[in-house]
Amino acid sequence: MHPNSASKEAVVLKLLEEGDTMLCLDARHEGVHMPPGHAQNPALQLILNLNFPRPIDVTAEGISASLTFGGRRFACYISWDALWGAFNPQTMQGMTWPDSMPAEVRADMEAQHAVPAPPPADPPTSQTSPPVRAEQAQSDKQREEPSTSRQRGHLRLVK
């Protein structure tokens, strides 16, 4: 058992009590049982909820549940060692365990965080005209267009 298993179990139980829970796991990990189409995914994300029609069992060893993939039910098992993140998908509150995260997932996350911010826009130079307020632009436009009086409709209300 992984040293963080107890904390992972507590986090998952707390999140499940609150509602939808997104689990991030390495489906390639030994002991994980997923459908063949997902078994090689190092960043598999599953949403669980205690209100699912089939029970979800959270034990000291891991999580087992009968989940539906493409309309077909599959008996799944997730060991705590394979779980590297759990959070509420609506609030994004939760926890990640970097020690359990696959190396390629960690590298992708680090690369995303290392992307430099776009450079700030160049400040206006003295040769450019000052910004025009929207009210001024609209009134200038109205002055340019010939004024046409609005014609009344030809329909009348008859009582």
Image: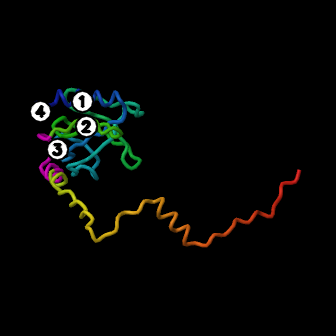
Label 2 SS: strand
Tell me the crowding category of disc 4: few under 14, some 14 to 19, or many 20 or more residues within 10 angstroms, Cα based: few
Disc 4 to disc 2, how far (Cα)?
16 Å
When the figure is inspected, residue 37 is found, relative to residue 88, above or below; the finding is: below
Q: Which numbered disc flags the more N-terminal residue, 1 or 3? A: 1
| Residue type, label 4 | His
Instruction: Give x and y (percent) for residue 86.
Output: 25, 37
What residue sits right under mark 4 in the picture? 2
Cβ atoms at labels 1 and 3 below 8 Å apart: no
Task: Give the label, 1 or 4, closer to the camera.
Answer: 1
In x, y percent, where is residue 96? 19, 39
Circle 3 is placed at which residue position? 29
Question: Whole-Å distance between the Cαs marked 2 and 1?
Answer: 7 Å
Disc 3/disc 4 C-alpha distance (Å): 13 Å
Query: How many labels sit on residues?
Result: 4
User: What is the magenta range?
Assistant: 98-109
Rounded to the nearest whole Å, what is the CA distance between mark 2 and mark 3?
Answer: 17 Å
Residues at circles 4 and 2 in contact by the CB criterion of under 8 Å: no
Q: Nearer the viewer, residue 2 or 115?
A: 115
* Numbered mark located on residue 86 in the image: 2
Q: From what the image shows, is residue 135 above or below residue 147? A: above
Which tag is nearer the camera, tag 4 or tag 2? 2
Amino acid type of disc 2? Ala
